[in-house]
Amino acid sequence: MVEFVTKETLKEYEAFVSSHSKGHFLQSYAWSKQKPEWIWEGFFVRNEDGNICGAMSVLIRRVPHLPYSIMYGARAPVCDIHDADVLAELMEGAKQLAAKYKAYCLKLDPDVSVNDTEFADIMSGLGFNRRDTGKNFSGIQPRFVFRLDIDGKSEDELMSSFHSKTRYNIRVAERKGVEVRTCGKEAVGDFSEMMLETGVRDNFVVRNREYFENMLDNLGSSCRLYMAYSGETPIAGTLAVHYGDKVWYLYGASSNKYRNFMPNYLLQWSMIQWAVSLGCKLYDFRGVSGDLDESNPLYGLYRFKKGFNGDLVEFHGEFEYIFNKPLNFAIEKGELAYRKLRKKLFILKNKK
């Protein structure tokens, strides 16, 4: 039987999710504070011993001017992904929420390799459709990621495993006097300005300053803002999140100047060192394009992350359970047009 998370069971839910191999910070209650315009609901199932054996949280957002909502489970579910019975019970919980909030669609983008056909078959049997989100960044979460196995490895072992050019660039940053500092909200202004500069340069829409300030407040010590300086001049920055036995690189920004100082390499190394100090098993570089043609404008991001000798992982992408097909079709078309317009207006507004 499905149980919904309450104040009394929240700690138990978090303990399960944070300790599970499929656990993810996007499934935590703390992350929901970063999304105040969404409603958070968590639910779980227990085994015969009374212990939680499967869990999921979803964010729920009302459709403007309509009595309907969408449900989204980022990197859900958290369970044995081949346990069809647990997955079916979790889906029953999702259906109860869909009825409560009049959801027209449930979207999931699980932490499951595309090679896992058994999981895909189970999801299909439960009524989900797998949506092809393409090879670039058209999905809600990246479909292709780089991950570095750091379980039981020392800093020296990891450094020696990096590509020689990556090691060289880390040393370049050190020789040029780049200093990496762990900062608080006092540095968010500089980071936000560089995010805007990076977004215009690389053609993507960025979050505002308040979003990053809220992230440091909402996630507390689990979130770190790393800033790279040349003297007292900020030249690059990154945000990293720790949850369970993993650290994720979430956002990165750099000034158009000082790029020859290679600050981004030293920043990545600093975040990896943090993950090692915490005893983590995995460092996640997050998204890259799955189009590995060198002519792809996103190839440089792939090459940069590949230099740290991680593994390229392709997830299944998005699974959808449609409760209202006509409404889902209409809203999908409208959102696609809105995203394209938003990106175009952002670039026009900020390009100098």
Image: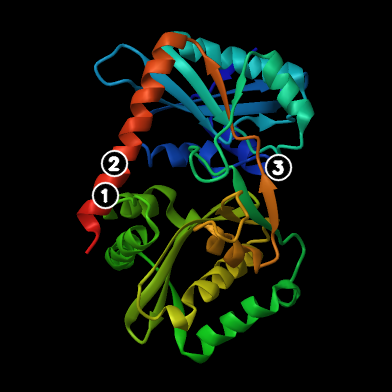
Q: Position of residue 71 (x, y in %)?
A: 46, 23
Give the residue number, with chain letter if any, for mark 3.
Answer: 21
Lower position in the chain sequence, tag 1 or tag 3: 3
In the displayed structure, would residue 71 be above or below residue 336? above
Name the quadrant of the C terminus: bottom left
Of helix, strand and loop, which one carries label 2? helix
Callout 1 amino acid: Phe
Q: Nearer the viewer, residue 136 or 73?
A: 136
Callout 2 amino acid: Arg
Position of 303 compared to 342: left or right? right
Give the residue number, with chain letter if any, for mark 2.
Answer: 342
In three-dimensional space, the C-alpha distance between marks 3 and 2, rounded to whole angstroms, equals 36 Å
Callout 3 amino acid: Ser
Position of 143 compared to 190: left or right? right
Position of 327 compared to 130: left or right? left
Q: Residues within 10 Å of mark 3 (few under 14, many from 20)?
A: some
- Find residue 100 and report its image quarter: top left
